[in-house]
Image (tube, rainbow, N blue to C red):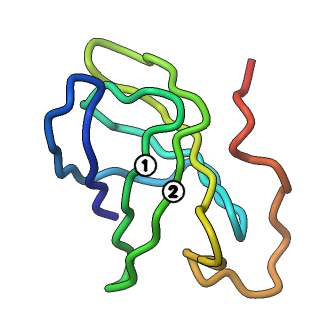
């Protein structure tokens, strides 16, 4: 997936990231190199579909690589077009 937005210093960024967990309205993504702040808005492009998300948490995993918890914004639901699969609710909550 592609992620774009503005980093904590106000600089625009575009990156390739991957999902670690997803639910119909939230996601935990990895391999983000830009440092983000809670409440920042980012856009995810996945299979030609754009969806806006709010950053709900960030965690530095290694030198310059972050995991980020995201929650979908507004009426945009089913960003990842999940079908009736078993998904865990609340995945955007930070893991210990």
Q: Pinpoint residue 81: horizontal percent, then vertical percent.
A: 60, 84
Residue at 64% over, 77% down: 75
Q: Pinpoint residue 48: horizontal percent, then vertical percent.
A: 32, 85
**Label 2 neighbour load within 10 Å: few <14, some 14-19, many 20+:** many
Image: 43 above or below 45: above
Q: Pinpoint residue 35: horizontal percent, then vertical percent.
A: 31, 25
Dot placed on the residue nearer the N-terminal end, 1 or 2: 1
Q: Pinpoint residue 47: horizontal percent, then vertical percent.
A: 37, 83
Judging by the rendered image, the residue that carries numbered circle 2 is: 53
Disc 2, SS: strand
Give left or right: position of 8 versus 54: left
Specify the quadrant of the image occupied by residue 56: top right
Residue at 52% over, 40% down: 55
Pick the quarter of the image with the N terminus.
Answer: bottom left
Question: Farthest residue in the top direction?
Answer: 63
How far apart are the two marked residues, 1 and 2, measured between alpha carbons? 6 Å
Image: 88 above or below 92: below
Contact between labelled residues 2 and 1, with CB atoms less than 8 Å apart: yes
Judging by the rendered image, the residue that carries numbered circle 1 is: 41
Give left or right: position of 90 versus 2: right
Pick the quarter of the image with the C terminus.
Answer: top right
């Amino acid at each position: 997936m592609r992620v774009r937005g503005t980093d904590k210093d106000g600089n625009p960024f575009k990156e390739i990231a991957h999902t670690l967990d997803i639910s119909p309205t939230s996601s935990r993504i990895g391999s983000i190199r830009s440092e983000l702040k809670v409440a920042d808005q980012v856009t995810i492009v996945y299979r030609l579909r754009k969806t806006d998300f709010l950053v709900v948490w960030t965690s530095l995993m290694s030198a310059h690589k972050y995991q980020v918890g995201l929650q979908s914004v507004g009426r945009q639901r089913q960003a990842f077009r999940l079908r009736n699969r078993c998904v865990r609710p609340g995945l955007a909550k930070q893991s210990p």
